[in-house]
Amino acid sequence: MLEKEADSKGADNLEIKYELSFIAKDGSVLISRGIVKDAFPKGKGFGYDTFQKREEICISKRSTFLPEDILRARCKIWKVLGEMAEDVRCIAHTRIGVEKTSFPWNEENFSTLESEKKCTYQIKSIKHDAPLISVDLSLTGGLSCDEIIRFELSLQDESIKFSTLQLSLVDASGNRVECNQDEFWFDSLAKSKQFTFFFAKEKLLAKKSIYLQGDLLSLHWEWAFSKGVVLEEIEEVRYESTTAENKIPDVENVKNEKKVPLSYTLSDNLKSLSDKQFLCDVTLKTKTSLFPAHKIILSASSPVFNEIFSSDMKENDSDSVNIQDLSDDAVSGMLLYMYTGHVEDLSWENASHLYVAADKYAIFSLKNICSSYLKECLSPSNACLVLLLSDLHADGDLKYAVQDYILKHVKDVVNSDKWKLLMECEACCRNRVSPVQIIFEGLLSYICHTCVKTWLYTWACVLNVEKNS
C-alpha cells in the first residue's frame, strides 16, 4: 500500500506512476504487479489487498522470499508530468521483534482426567522470566461423543501482537508426531484464543501403548511471539543522475505487456545476441523447432538450467536440450523473457503455456506474471481449466483465486461448454483420477475453510443445473 500523508506538502492531488515488488538479495524481482498510474489525494492511498500469500512467503517459498529471515520490498515512483532532475534512492530498515521458545508438557494420569477440569501451563519469557501466555488444557464432550482435548490461550503480556505454535505428540519411542500448527493475532478486544488438539481422548486411549505409556500424555511445544515493530529507520539516502533504467516507462498497457525492470541497454544487447544467434553454445529442441541460446543466460535465469549445465546430467555433455513437452510459442516466450525481462502479447492460451514453462524451469518471476494474467482473465469457460492447471502445478495462490471465482459464478461455470466436455471426460476416466474429481475435491477443501452456507448453495446450484439439463 502506497499512501500520501495528510499533512504532506505540494499538490492536493498528485498523479504518479509506481511499481511495488518483492525483490531478492541481489535486487532481482521476485514478484511485481507491474507499473500502475494513480492520482493520490492527501491522506489517501492505493495498493493491493492481496499482493502475495503469506503462507507462500513464510512457508512454502521461504528460502526464496526470506533469505536470512529478511523480506525485501521495493517501491519505484515516477513523475507523470515533467522530468526529474535527479534520482533519489532511499533504503529503509524495519525490524520486527520475535522471541522463540520450546518446551515439553507432560500430563500424568491422563486417562483419569475429568471433563471440564483444567490443567494450566504458564509460558514465561526466556529473557525476562515474565509471563507471556497461559495455556489451559481441558476435556469437553459427553457419553454420546468422543471427548475433545481443548486448549485455551490467555494473554498475559498485552504487548504481544502475534504468535505462532507448532504442537507435537511425543510417542513411546521419543518420536514427535506433528499435530497442530496455528497462528494467533491478539488485540485489546481479543486477549484469549482456543484451539482443538488433533487427537481426541478416545483415539489416544485406543493406542495407549504408543501414545500414553505409563498413562502419561507427553507434548512438545514450539512457540514464537512477536510484539510488532521494534525498530524503524532510514539507513541511507542516495542522490544520482537520472539513468535510462529509472526513467518512466512508455508502456501503458500492462495487461498486454508486463515488464520486470532491467537496464534497457543491456536488455537490447542481450536480445541482439539472441536474434543474431551470435556465439550461441546450446540449442533447445522442441518437437518441431530449434532455438539457439546461450548457456550463461539460461543458467542465470533458471536454477533448473543452471543444474543441467553444471551437473553430470545427460544434457551437460551435449550442445542441445530436448524440450518435447513444451510448444514452440512457450519456448520462444520463455527465451524472450530470459533475455529481455519482457513478456509480450499475452493471451489466455499462451499465458497458460508460458506458465507451464516457467514452472518447469523455476523462473518464478515469469510464473507470477502469467499467474496474475490468468487471474485477471478468469471466465466461466476457462475457470475449470485454470483450476486443473493450478492443481497440477501445486500453485496454492492461483488455486485459491480460481476456487473463489467458481463459487461466485457456479451457475455460469457448470452451464459452460468446457464443463460439459469435462463431464464427458469424466465418463472416460474409469480407474484414474478425473478432472471433475479434482475440481470437486479442490472446491470441497476450499469450502471447508470458508462457509457451510456457501457449500450448500454451490451444490444446490449444481444439482439444479443437472436436473434441468
Image: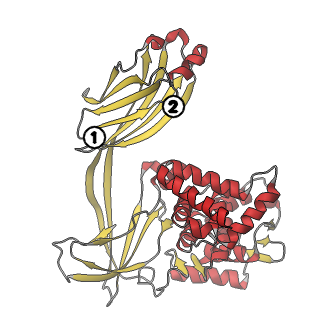
Badge 2: residue crowd in 10 Å (few <14, some 14–19, many ≥20): some
Q: Which residue is mark 2?
A: 198
Residue 180 horizontal side relative to residue 388, left or right: left
Residue 325 falls in image quadrant = bottom right
Q: Check contact, mark 1 vs mark 2: CB within 8 A.
A: no
User: Where in the figure is residue 105, as x and y percent of width and height?
Assistant: 42, 20
Q: Residue at x 34, y 86 (%)?
A: 80
Q: Which of these two is toward me, 119 or 371?
A: 119
Vertical arrangement, residue 301 with respect to residue 246, above or below: above
Camera-side residue of 388 and 262? 388
Q: CA distance from mark 1 to mark 2?
A: 26 Å
Horizontal arrangement in the rendering, residue 119 relative to residue 42 (left or right): right
Q: Residue 366 occupies which quadrant of the picture?
A: bottom right
Hey, what amino acid is under mark 2? Phe
Q: Which residue is mark 1?
A: 160
Q: Relative to 227, does residue 36 appear above or below in the rendering?
A: below
Q: Position of residue 314 (x, y in %)?
A: 82, 57
Q: Secondary structure at mark 1?
A: loop
Residue that appears at 44% across and 28% down: 221
Which image quarter holds the N terminus?
A: bottom left
Q: Which mark is residue 18?
A: none
**Which comes sooner in the sequence, label 1 or label 2?**
1
Looking at the rendered image, the disc whose residue lies closer to the viewer, 1 or 2, is: 2
Name the spot of residue 307 as percent of width and height, x first: 70, 56
Nearest the viewer among 185 and 405 is: 405
Q: Amino acid at mark 1?
A: Ile
Q: Residue furthest front?
A: 468
- The answer to whether any part of residue 399 appears in the image is no
Q: Secondary structure at mark 2?
A: loop
